[in-house]
Amino acid sequence: MSVKTRTGRAAVMTEVKKDLEIWDYPLPEVLPGCILVRITCCTICGSDLHTWTGRRKSPVPIILGHEIVGTILELGKGVTMDSGNNPLRVGDRITWTIMDNCGKCYFCREKGLMMKCTHLKKYGHDSCADPPHFVGGFAEYCYITPGTCVIRIPDELTDEEVAPANCALATVVAGRDAIEIQPFENVLIQGAGALGVYATALASYCGCRRIIVADVMEHRLDFVKQFGATDTIDSKGLSDEEVIGKVKDITGGFGADVVMELAGFPPLLPLGLKCLRTGGRLVEIGNAFAGALFNCDASDIVFKCLTIRGIHNYDTLHLQKAVDFLQTARNRFPFGRIVGQRVSLDEINTGLKIAESGRTIRVAVKP
Ligand SMILES: [Zn+2]
Ligand SMILES: [Zn+2]
């Protein structure tokens, strides 16, 4: 049977906070440079929840999901290699960047900011109303277009280990590179969700000395200890002064060399600045939604000679580094435990509610 005559199922969001609906769409013709993938796993990211709850605006109808892994069903003409020069064949397992960028615009070519491409398309972020329809992860298929960086998955990594690399881990790698974390530094990680868990593992792998993780959920702080956290701070009910005091106690009275804000709670940014030592660096990643206002004494930045970097998404090289990191460090950290629950495509609404509860770091959708 020709692919053209077949249809596939997708969980479609038509309205904020409304249950997703299972729709059938015709499978697209695979054009040169494109790939049709049979999705095997898509993990639910915090930003999928932002869209579903209306915290972030998106067009509808939409197929959410961007932390995707699948097997190649059909290769378009001219696609022979992944971005690491590994041959690609039908049946290979692959992951790919969250975005398709043009490679030719001002941001792609001149400024090294392909995630800000003026012709940017993002999987799980654009309307699915028009063909090829399959542009998100909560579906049976995904249609990959030529501006996407595709990576063949090493055999030893499971689908569940790799899926969150596409967003959470690659973003943390971009944050680590931006702030240039060095061996023996003391790091404060704000938030022990997926970003915080990966940041902890990376800091540990980089040889950091004290890796302090703060969160308001005790079970997350317990979990992150398996990824190299040396100290945890349960900040529920603590004043800012108490948190700062704890960080200073752990770091010889100076404060952290590096703070990573990964929780997406605006007041954590000024608190993070106060937790830094003089000359420290902060990377802001979590507050990826409009209206994230905070109060800050600008003299904290001036008098302490601080550096602040903002990171949104990542460059293609960071996804390759993310997969390399999983492959290299898989015997050191239990990446397979990050997915704590699994649902089928038909159970997607249950999956979203589990993800929203924060009971587990990641929920996997297995279509
Ligand atoms: Zn571009
Ligand atoms: Zn994401």
Image: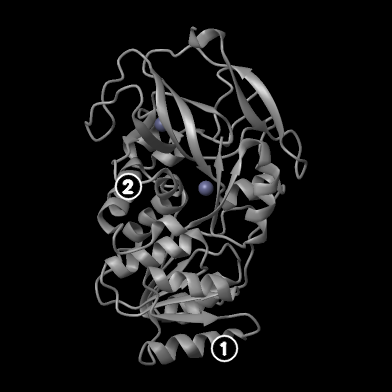
Q: Residue at x 31, y 70 (%)?
A: 204
Q: Position of residue 308 (x, y in %)?
A: 43, 65
Q: Is residue 284 visible?
A: no
Left or right side of 199 for 183: left
Q: Residue at x 28, y 30 (%)?
A: 82
Q: Tell me if residue 335 comes above or below residue 111 in the rendering.
A: below
Labelled pair 1, 2 in contact (Cβ < 8 Å):
no
CA distance separating discs 1 and 2: 39 Å
Q: Which mark is residue 241?
A: 1
Q: Which amino acid is tagged 1?
A: Glu
- Could you say whether the residue bearing mark 2 is in a helix, strand or loop? helix
Which dot, 1 or 2, sits closer to the camera?
A: 2
Q: Which residue is mark 2?
A: 323
Q: Position of residue 299 (x, y in %)?
A: 50, 79
Left or right side of 49 for 251: left
Q: Residue at x 64, y 63 (%)?
A: 293
Q: Looking at this view, is 231 or 174 the one in front? A: 231
